Amino acid sequence: MSRRWIQNPKRCADEYLDGIEDFIAFARAHNPGATRIRCPYRRCNNTLWETIENVQFHLIRNGMIKTYSTWTYHGEQLDIASSSRATRVENVEPIVDHNEQVMDILNDAFPFASTSSNQEGEDDVPTSMDSADFEQYEKLLQNSNQDLYPRCDNFFVLTATVELMYRKIKYRMSNLCFDYFLEVFKRMLLTDNCLPKDHRQAQKVLNGLGLGYEKIHACKNNCMLFYKEYETLDTCPICNESRFKTTSQNRMTKIPQKVMCYLPLKSRLQRLYMSTHTATYMRWHNEKRVDDDVMRHPANGEAWKEFDRTFPKFAADPRNVRLRLATDGFNPYGVLNQHHSTWPIFVFPYNLPPWKCMKKEYMMMTVLITEDPGRSIDVYLRPLVDELKDLWTNSVRTYNKSTGKMFTLRATVMWTVNDFSAYAMVSG
């Protein structure tokens, strides 16, 4: 029986779906009465045992190991004549294509999509998605299975968008330059292609993956943020300055005088546990760190150990996150404008091993202040401080990809690192 369907990247194709049905029927026939079988999904790699329904779900959504054409783990016998020349399945490096990598990103962003209905209500398993999340997931899943153009075998819409946006960021391409190349690529492809026409449309395709940001209006004089109890006000209660710019009466859109960008911290910390690539590393400081007299990581320091003694309940769960906060101002325009200063505020998770926690991939920018805040930096830090207080007192329910269970995540800031001028501002 031909098993070319395993190599088919289009997992919605009839050939692929029929092949999955044949595999499930084969596994049932050779494992009579079994409720769990080995899962040949690339990440499970025939080492994890799943229910037959979950195995079928994994294979339809993510695909089978492309080298697993002889189903030895599910009852099929190897041909003795060729077994001496055959490469063992577990020693073959799975072939990873771009479409599979994008599906991995989608699976990490929506781990609750595979939750079975009979698991709902249990404390350590994820609950089912709400309607808004499910709608986003369905939209992304549709883009992940839609050809970039008719009869395109290499790229789906979501894969192409992720690839292009990744290169834009990696090579620091401006939005204007990115729009130009998208226009050129779109003209190069077939007329009925689905490539986004500009950067704004590409962002809309990826919006469902989360990790966005919020725009919070601020007083022109840095008195306060129009946030929480002040969100509906049109004037600052401290200096009576208008929240919006004065425009012509015919203009319907209100333009704020000052805007601060805030990137929520909770969702970013949750994503560290929802991703297969980082979930296990978040416990490195407790499980794999060498505990001797050598200072290799902040966990070897006395401050970390004293904190554990002071807060034993927090220290009891190694999944709780220790953070460092750092900020400083810089002039992005060089000598063109000596009076301008931009202040990004970064948070670093110190649960990660030393070769990861200081990499830019794990530097989380939480606040972007577009001018020198002076002594009013505490005004702009309020959303972050509120979120940190909530993470300390109330915690947040988080899905751990490495264990497949939910847990209660807490976080604390243990250090702030600044130069002396920024230290004076932050501490004041």
Image (spheres, rainbow, N blue to C red):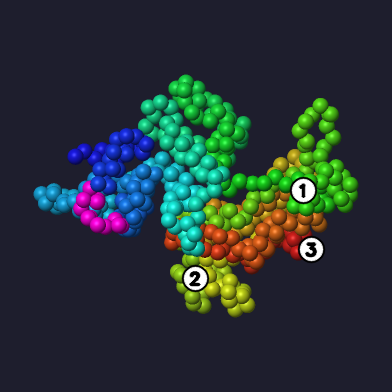
- Say which label, 2 or 3, has the lower sequence index: 2
Q: Mark 2 to mark 3: distance in Å?
A: 34 Å
Is label 2 or label 3 in front?
2
Residue hosting label 2? 286
Residue 11, quarter of picture: top left
For this view, does 143 lie left or right of residue 416? left
Q: Which of the numbered marks, if any, corresponds to residue 231?
A: 1
Rate crowding at label 2 as few (under 14), some (14 to 19) or many (20 or more) other CA atoms within 10 Å. Answer: some
Give the SS element for disc 1. Answer: loop
Q: Nearer the viewer, mark 3 or mark 1?
A: 1
**Residue 240 visible, this orientation:** yes
Specify the segment rendered in magenta. 26-37
Task: Name the image quarter holding residue 131.
Answer: top right
Q: Residue furthest left?
A: 81
- Mark 1: few, some, or many residues within 10 Å (few <14, many ≥20)? few
Residue type at numbered disc 3:
Gly
Q: Residue 259's x, y, as percent?
A: 74, 44
Specify the label residue 428 is tagged with: 3
Above or below, 428 against 179 in this view is below
Helix, strand, or loop for circle 2? helix
Residue 27 covered by magenta stretch? yes
Q: Is residue 129 left or right of residue 81?
A: right
